[in-house]
Structures are given as C-alpha cells and as structure tokens.
Amino acid sequence: MKAARIVHVKEPLQIQQLETPKPKGIEVLVRIISSGVCHSDIHLWEGGYEGIEGQFMKTTDRGVKYPLTPGHEIAGVVEATGEGVEGLSRGDRVIVYPWIGDGTCPACRAGEENLCDKPRSLGVYTEGGYAEYVLASSYKYLIKIDDKLDFDVAAILSCSALTAYTAVKNASLRPDEDVVIVGVGGLGLMAIQVIKSLTGARVIAMDIDDEKLKVAKSNGADFVINSKKDDPVKGVMELTHKLGADSVIDFVNASKTVETDMQMLRRRAKVVLVGLYGGELKLNLVSMPTRAYRLIGSYTGNLRDLAELVSLTERGVIKPIVSHKFKLEQATEALTMLKEGKITGRGVLKP
C-alpha cells in the first residue's frame, strides 16, 4: 500500500510502498477514503512542541518513533476483518476512533482512552491515515456511518470536531452565558456550531484574520473581534456589560492568548485550553480562589462522545466544514498550508 510518511522531521513527507496489513483476531483493515489534516500532525512533522521558557518538547521523548505515517482523522470502508470481529462486514462505511489506550489504566477503565497513561493512538504512536489502508486494533474502535454521510465530513469528526465538541461540553455552557472562542480555524468554527445548536449561549468569536471572522459570523457567532486590530479585553467587556465572559475556549493556547483570556473573565468563569501552540503562563494566584476561576485542559474526546457527534452530524444538527482536498502526494503541501493559516475549515487527504 502507498503511504505518506514522516521520515525525517521538518523535511517533506516521503511517499513509500508498505506491506498492506492483514487483520487477525479482532483487528479490522480499513480502506481509507478520507484522512483529515490536523494541527497535531504539524507538531509530529516538526518533531515537537514549544514548552516553558522556550524549551522544545520533543515528540520522541513522548514515545513517538520515526519513520511514521501520521493521520488520525480517518473514514473509509471495511476491507477485511479478523476471525474474532463481530457486527462488521466487508464494505461497511466506518469512522475509525484513533485515541486508543492500553485498556488497563484508570482512564481506560473509565472509558476515557483518549487520556490513557500509555496511549497507542493511530497516526501518533502507530501507523495512521496518510495511507491507502489502516489497521484498527479492534472492531470496537469503528463506528458505522450512514450512507448519506460524506466521507470527507466523517473523517474530521474523530479529532477536530470531537475536540471542539468535548471542549464545549467541558465549558458546561447555559443559554444565558457569554463564551469567547479564541481562534476560529476548523476547531473554532466547529465549536461555534455546537454551542449555537446545543447550548444557546452567546458567542464572541476572536481571531486576527478578518476572513476567518466573516466565516465565524456566518456559522453563528453573535459578535466578532479582530484581536490584532482592536483591544480584545475592552471589546469583550463592552459586550458583557463590563462583567466579563462566563467562559473562554482557547483553540490557540499560546502564552499571549491565555494571558489575554485571564483578563476578560467574570467571577466563576472557566477557561478551557485546547490548542497546542504552547508556551507558559504567569497567574495571579490570589485571584484564582477569590474569583473562583477554573482552568480546564481539554484533549480530544472519548468513544462515547464520538458516537454522539456522529449522530448529530447525520441528523444535520451540525455541519463540519471541509474546505480543501488534497491527493496523498500533496501531504507536505497540505501541512504547509495549514501551518501558514491558509486553510479555513479543514483539509482532507484523498488516498
């Protein structure tokens, strides 16, 4: 099978021919129709994340091994099954849940495999979706999808949409609340749709790109603020009667954005940190208890959340935006465009 692989960090991905896996036991081989291009793939490609005091956190220190086929947003068709597989047949349309754990840690036992102590995530620790086929370690990680659900849309549900959906759930929003969405790329746009469809909260979208803010407005944002041109704190305070936002969901999560987040909160507010841009944050520790702020880290979502999200999408409650489609040979171009902020919505590879 053909795969686009990271052989050396910061170098173009290489198209290689690999042996097509043969499923055994409860494994399932999926022929990939669409594979989403995610910001996390950029960090794998660059070899790490920015940490505190400018320290670079290497992916290899976290157990990532190269060469690696990235890609964890996968939708396709069942090609073959092991002898122990139940409920799936060749030709079934499926989404692959990629956040696989070891099955034994406390998080896995609680149904939170995405937070496993020893993760085995597809496209991160094992071979992923920038390929013609992917091997799912268990049929339990596959969700059947309706014939009417587009594969491109289905693919991005398992990470970008799932991450946004879980972040909104972590914010516990109510109809009478104000929420600021920081960064309106693919995840931010998805979060706006989820908020407006399921919670009724008032959305203030924030970004430095006017075109993205226009798209955010068309996706349901009540107000938009260009934080590069205008004072974001002043803008939020004016829109919230000088009380501040009830929640901020930060899909950038950089030092500068989170420092700003902390200045626009009303008492009892929640800050949900999602993005992986990185950096560090200095906190006024007295204000944390006296104003009862809550900082919440939110990372992808569990299999139950994905099943809920698939149902919402199939019923048309939410409509994920796929704006760019690439061939497998264009994987490096896709990652470069995403890094440079040239993709509004989400991009997918088509093996």
Image (cartoon, grey):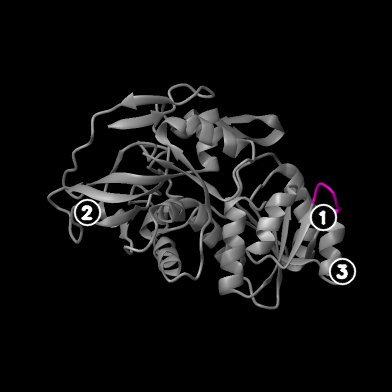
Estimate the spatial distance between the alpha carbons at disc 1 and disc 2, rounded to whole Å: 50 Å
The residues colored magenta run 227-232
- 202 versus 116 height, above or below: below
Instruction: Give the camera-side residue of 226 and 218.
Output: 218
Of the numbered discs 2 and 3, the one sitting upstream in the chain is 2
Type of the residue with mark 2: Gly
The nearer-to-camera label among 1 and 2 is 2
Q: What label does residue 15 carry, if any?
A: none
- Local secondary structure at mark 1: helix
Quadrant placement of the N terminus: top left
Estimate the spatial distance between the alpha carbons at disc 2 and disc 3, rounded to whole Å: 56 Å
Tell me what residue is drawn at x 18 percent, y 56 percent. 89
Task: Identify the residue under disc 1.
Answer: 232
Quadrant placement of the C terminus: top left
User: Quick check: 209 left or right of 336?
Assistant: right
Q: Position of residue 144 (x, y in %)?
A: 30, 61
Estimate the spatial distance between the alpha carbons at disc 1 and disc 3, rounded to whole Å: 13 Å
- Local secondary structure at mark 3: loop
Q: Is residue 333 visible?
A: yes
Task: Identify the residue under disc 3.
Answer: 242
Type of the residue with mark 3: Lys
Of the numbered discs 1 and 2, the one sitting upstream in the chain is 2
Q: Among all residues in the image, which is located at the extreme left? A: 83
Task: Identify the residue under disc 2.
Answer: 91
Residue 274 drawn in magenta: no
Q: Is residue 47 visible?
A: no
Secondary structure, magenta segment, majority class: loop
